[in-house]
Image: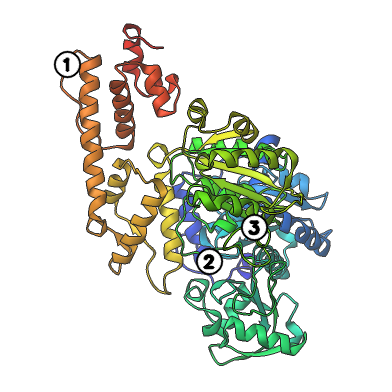
Amino acid sequence: MAENARYAATAPQPGKFGWLTPSIQKSRERSETYGLRELARPDYHVLSGPELSVKREQNRMLCTHAMPVMETLHEQIINTQSMIVLTDAHGLILHAIGDDDFLPRAEKVALRPGANWAEDRQGTNAIGTAIAEQCPIVVHGKQHYLAANQFLTCSSVPILDPYGDLIGVLDVTGDYRSYHQHTMALAKMSVQMIENHLFASTFRETLQVAFHARAEFLGTLMEGIAAFTSDGRFLSANRSAQFQLNLPLSALRAHTLSSLFGLTSAQLIDTVRHHDGQWLTLNLHNGAVVRARVDFRRTPGAPAASPHDAGFKLRTTTRSTLRPAPLAPAAQSRLSHLDTGDPQVASVIAKVRKVLGKDIPILLNGETGTGKELLAQAIHNDSPRRDGPFIAVNCASIPETLIESELFGYEEGAFTGARRKGSNGKLLQADGGTLFLDEIGDMPYPLQVRLLRVLQERVVNPLGSNRSIPVDIAIVCATHRDLREMIAHNRFREDLYYRLNGLVVKLPPLRERTDLTPVVQRMLQLESAHSAAGVPPLSVASDVMKLFEQCTWPGNFRQLGNLLRTAAAMVEDDGVIRREHLPDDFFEDLCRASSDAHAAAGALDATWCGGSAPLPPPVRLQDVEACAIAAAIARHGGNVSAAARSLGVSRNTIYRKMPGVAGASGSRTDN
């Protein structure tokens, strides 16, 4: 008992579990609510090899930066009957390394890659409890809820991404008799190394200020690092920077380079140039004096004499920008972030992963606002070209007279109004990276011929030039149009279509997705993260969430994002979005959709069921979906095949969602 108390973070507390710390006591109480029993056999389910490979790929960046640190940590604690474990944000073990004499014992309780150690599966344990409590924690011996795990002592530290979100846990586990108090300190240092590596990788081409009150700590784990855009907007800061600035990340997002360090970006860059590589002395907003080094990079070819634009090639966006799921900044978007529970989206992601890095063009279909650009950015960020540029071109937004020069570039004097020294087009700007052609269906027909040539020959000829410039690009295109129908009407080249459609995937509209609740929650988390310190997190009242489920969202994520952003500005002090905070046009859309669906349901009822009473207005997302199918069938005179084509689904989908249709289909023409 005395040995157990020695490892408690606070003095023993009275109560049901006696000597347990408050955090572990709460964890054990949660374990009971999960229906676990102390003497029960633990959950020993382990993912198969292919399933684990998918999970590791989804967490590739975390694994890439954590594995070298884990190996270094293992060298420090080797021969101590212990192991080091890396999990994802949900407690799934991704990797584990350790002593040969301890690993077999750990495997007996499924402490191995592919097993999940969340609290609801394993009860109180360092990994699951660190996730639940969002803080480092030690669980020693009999503090474990399940008796099978009580031979262990575990020290776990949450790993946060550069924006402060939990992405994993680093755990050191060993025999409870060999625990050492320095283990947690080593685990914390290792996590800080991982987070700093992730930070450096995320903000490669931004203005970074590394600082500390003592110059000898610059370049070590103790230095604070803050990242800013070229105009001084705050992006993020590591743990040490938050500590030295005495502000949490949520509060720092309201600051700028000037408010934190007393200098604009232009002044700071000029100061750096005059110090010729020496440390700078800067004054923090709280009056502290620090030594600092500044790192910034210009886009190749940018004029060095203009500190105001500083020539930065930024691939980050502010966290205040609401985007479609995965609802993270576009430059940090990953395919794993996009998976919020909808099976259709999960299927799209699985297909895309299989062609990454294989020089296969990808064509994204979907309605306007379904997140095609965000998916394209995620494809780039997860591809081997992630360090190259991501260049997006909206073919529908550029005037037809300018799109050729925008894409292919031009030489000086190529046409009236051309810039001196010419201009590199988007194709050349994307060299070594990814070119995203949004709304490719709106590209003028004559330009499709030139684009096809570039894709075939991999060379670009700028306007007014006889030069052929080699270009190495990956192509991702997107459209909401039916390109096959456009081909039939000679509005899109068939040869270009078959050059672009290496992999064709379709993003479902918001009304067809099953993950509306987590999508809304994630969007509100981003909006809350940009709020001032002390402001309650945003949430949605239950009756409002039901209204969201009834809406058909014709504007998809753009409509939802604008609605949430407006509602967030109108909420009361409790941060809860209620009906009175929603704009009037939302209710108009809701009423219109309900009226249309009601009429369609009545028409279907009359068509298929002999004229019985119409169905009531839909009150669930499933009802809206059924009514949309009903309307399509009614619109096509009962022809299920035609209705399926108009909805972009298979006949089997209609039969599955509306069994009554399958029963009556024999009496209808269905071809």
Determine whether 205 is above or below 386 in the image. below
Determine whether 586 is above or below 494 in the image. below
Determine whether 644 is above or below 120 in the image. above
Marks 3 and 1, Cα distance to the nearest angstrom?
A: 69 Å
Residue pictured at 21% horizontal, 31% vertical: 598
Question: Where is residue 545 shown, x and y percent of the image?
Answer: 31, 48
Residue pictured at 68% horizontal, 52% vertical: 462
Question: What's the residue type where badge 1 is placed?
Answer: Gly
Is residue 201 found left or right of 335 in the rendered image?
Answer: right
Question: Where is residue 86 shown, x and y percent of the image?
Answer: 68, 54
Foreground pick, 601 / 389? 389
Foreground pick, 390 / 552? 390
Question: What's the residue type where badge 2 is placed?
Answer: Thr
**Label 3: which secondary element:** loop
Q: Which label sits on residue 414?
A: 3
For residue 238, what is the image quadrant? Answer: bottom right
Q: Which label sits on residue 21?
A: 2
For residue 135, what is the image quadrant? Answer: bottom right
Display colour scheme: rainbow
The residue to which callout 1 is attached is 611
The answer to whether one can see residue 418 in this image is yes
Image quarter (top left, top right, bottom left or bottom right) of the N terminus: bottom right
